[in-house]
Amino acid sequence: MTAIGAWSPTGPAASGVAITIPWLGAILLMAWRRHARILGFTASLVSVAASVGLLLAAPAGESLREALMVLFSCLTLASTLMLPKRDCDAPTMAGILFILGATLAAYSTDNLAVFLAGWILTTVPFLVRSWFRAPSWRPATALSLSSLALALAIVLISTSGHALSIEALKGQSPGGTVAFGLLVTAVILRKGICPAQAWVADLAEGGPAIPTALLVNGHFGALLVARLILPLFPRTAGNLFPVLSWFAMATALYVAIRALTEDSPRRLLSFVALSQSAVILAGLESRTSEGITGALVHWFVVTVSTMGLFGILRLLEVRFGENLTASRHLGLAQHAPRLAVSFAVFGLALVGLPGTLSFCSQDLLIHGTLMSHPVTGVVLPIATAMNAVSILRLFARLFLGKRRTGFTHMADALPRERWILAGGLLFVVLGGLFPNLIVAQRSAETDAVALRTDAAMQDIPRKTSGLRARAASPQTTTMDYVDSKQ
Amino acid sequence: VSLSQTALVFVVMAPGAVFALLAVLWLLGWVPSERVLSRITGLTFTACLFGLATLLWTLATRASAITVTFGNWFAVHDYRFPLILMADRWSLPFLVMTVALSGLIGQFSATYLHRESGFFRFFLFLYLFAFGSLLAFAAGSFDLLIAGWELVGITSVLLIAFFDQRPAPVENGLRVFAVYRAADIGLLVGVFALHEWAGTASFAGGMPTLKEAQATVVCLFLLLAAAGKAAQIPFSGWLPRAMEGPTPSSAIFYGAISIHAGAYLLLRAQPLIAQTHTAATCVIIIGAATAGYGTLTGRASADAKTSLAFASLTQVGVIFVEIGFGWRSIAVAHILGHAVVRTLQFLRSPSMLHDYHRMHSAIGGEISPTGRHLEDLIPETAQVWLYRWALDRGHLDTILDRWFIHPLLQISRLFGRLDGIGMTAGSIPRKESSISMHSPAEEAIK
């Protein structure tokens, strides 16, 4: 099967537009080097429109792939507007558009080769010294090794399964335990699961803030689990995948503890984001409807919140200097009250404040993981509690305290930034007030998974929620619904 | 929908709606004047009182409980988060107390915080707090109660850090937040266990029956959460730190509503507690120990608000004991009486010396402190030892720091060192262009 033939059948043209326009925009920017924001905004807007078209055309309950495309393209659109003037040059914008195209390619495809290409292409700007590469050696190494592990796994899978289509390979465990191990290695390296967690903080510290947030918020590790590992290796995953889940929970706890004494705002934010996103893996592995739905909803919350937090932090750095620290009170709320409030809401939304969407996702995740792992599942609320303390500490140190007098006047959120922040806040708050709009959609997708589960999953024991016996459907494989659309 | 159901929804939602409206207006750049804000506050809580009067009339004449069901907030398969509001003989007193005292504090603060830079912020938090409290007290399920409970916690912390120009209130707020979040793990896990074993966390149709072992586990987790919120032993150390906030917020949080939220949680869970002797005994022991602790440490407190806070703690400890014994009606009456008196005392605390002088003048002598006759029974050496113990607030903070916080921070630093393996010393330079936080003058001084 060719790569082109494996594009989404519901809208190959729309998928093509969503992916190629950002790339064309990137090429144009590199050649022309003018009007970076306008070009970036336009290309992202086209991508958003195409993704929304795909989402509207997607069948009910089978729209996660399209929803993720909309989410990421909206995120990039927001980035193009939020990027401070100082950072808004042609190479940065081109890099952002490049990441957008590659990420959407990986989200939308059913072909292993295209998936690999998308995976690698998203990392390219972070490997090139003149682009986004951080001065530390760890990010480049982790990203390269993860790509290598995935490439080896895909070679093994395609040679033993004689196909490149995920749909065709479903349930066959192609490549056996070696391929499975390589895929898990790729997840660990890309997602920053312990012991490979340090590169995320290094990149956040030394790399450009907003592109780094985009890279991390692609959640390729979770995507790999959902798109490849669970559908292709149901038996192996059933037996060995809990190990990855324990690693994910250990990561959530490890980086939550690590964040408690971190004074660099960027590092601290990256630790909290990493801890919260590691929880997504645990939810996907929980093999309970609550856990999987919670993980999918949490994916959205973490993405929007961390993007907002990194964006605000960059705006603060541009206005007040880059040596911001969480070791003393800086009193920036006096100068930038709207940025302060936005930071507080995004931060608390990340850690489960009632009235935000993460309250619902955390509730579902905690129920799901505790059902699945009654002992280790307790790690989740503990890690979340620590993350909440770290976020509030960062907020308190950055924004509260005596008003600084070292500078005369600094602008609060500019109008374009204000609209973007308001959009993000509306998403997390309205999503929290009316969560069923999002939860029901993700839950329906989980249902679709249950109905289409491969026969190979039949003998994997189901986790039921105690007295609440469920309908006798086989256990979920999370994102099979993506493949079921073929 | 009946009038009483509408009234219940209005009472709970009105402060939340005003909060949302004011917050949006602020984001759009409009801040109401002190006079307007004061009027809005008066109107809102007066209207809520009328709503409560309707509820009271309905409960007194027709129904034993008023329930409003909105369906599920969200649902995944057979896991549901029901949105049920309920006013019954246990929740209505708390609703009345919250509305009446919030309105009172609003009016008091209009004068007390006049021309304070955080005037608007205070009222915003007051509305959010009132909404959270009303949601927690009117919740028909533990799930919804958690939502209100968390809102009360976060507003409490934000108000402790109200005077954010000084580091101490901010740091103390952070400490209180940490304790709240640690204790809230008990609530989350307890409610999960209730879902798992009873199939629901709703108490609108009566509390479910569990096996004794299951009831014990659930109750002990809920007790952990209640103890954290009510500053019971071993969490009592945060209460004096919370006195950094403005006096009106101290009055409503730690004299009246927030401090009793833990007791309310136990009141709701009391049918479960009654099923298990272990949990009931734990509630009684913790309550009694806290009462003793509160009265001893309160005597060694040098400032008015802290001694009042410990006096509150003593009474809440006694209330826990009453709940442990199953005397729910007595506990509710005790809470109402205590909340009203303590709020008055807190509000008068800035002029406490003046009040004492007036009382002394009136009676022609000094008022002897309560419990002096009991103090005299204790040997002098023991009195000295107890005084030292009380002065350090029972060493609770020291124990918490030494045995929990410091080891945790050391582990965190160890993780930091592990993360740094393979890296050269010093921070990673930025890709992005860099400017200094400091002004040229500050740089020169550095």
Image (cartoon, coloured by chain):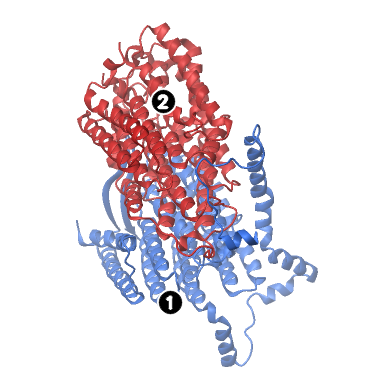
Chain colours: A red, B blue
Viewer-nearest residue: A264 or B226: A264
Vertical position of residue B66 compared to residue A30: above or below = below
Residue bearing the label numbered 2: A121
Residue B227 seen in the figure: no
Element type where label 1 sits in the image = loop
Inspect the image, locate mark 1, and give the three-letter code of the amino acid beneath it: Arg
Q: Residue A132 location in percent, x, y? A: 47, 35
Classed neighbour count for the residue bearing mark 2: other residues with Cα under 10 Å, few (<14), some (14–19), many (≥20) = many
Q: Residue furthest front?
A: A32
Q: Chain of mark 1?
A: B
In front: label 1 or label 2: 2
- Residue at 27 percent of width and 53 percent of height: B68
Q: Residue furthest right?
A: B381
Q: Quadrant of the C terminus of chain A?
A: top left
Name the image quarter holding residue B113: bottom left
Vertical position of residue A459 compared to residue A388: above or below = above
Q: Residue A291 location in percent, x, y? A: 40, 33
Vertical position of residue B113 compared to residue A328: above or below = below
Left or right of residue A21: residue A176 = right
- Residue at 25 percent of width and 35 percent of height: A46
Inspect the image, locate mark 2, and give the three-letter code of the amino acid beneath it: Leu
- Residue at 38 percent of width and 21 percent of height: A115
Residue bearing the label numbered 1: B115
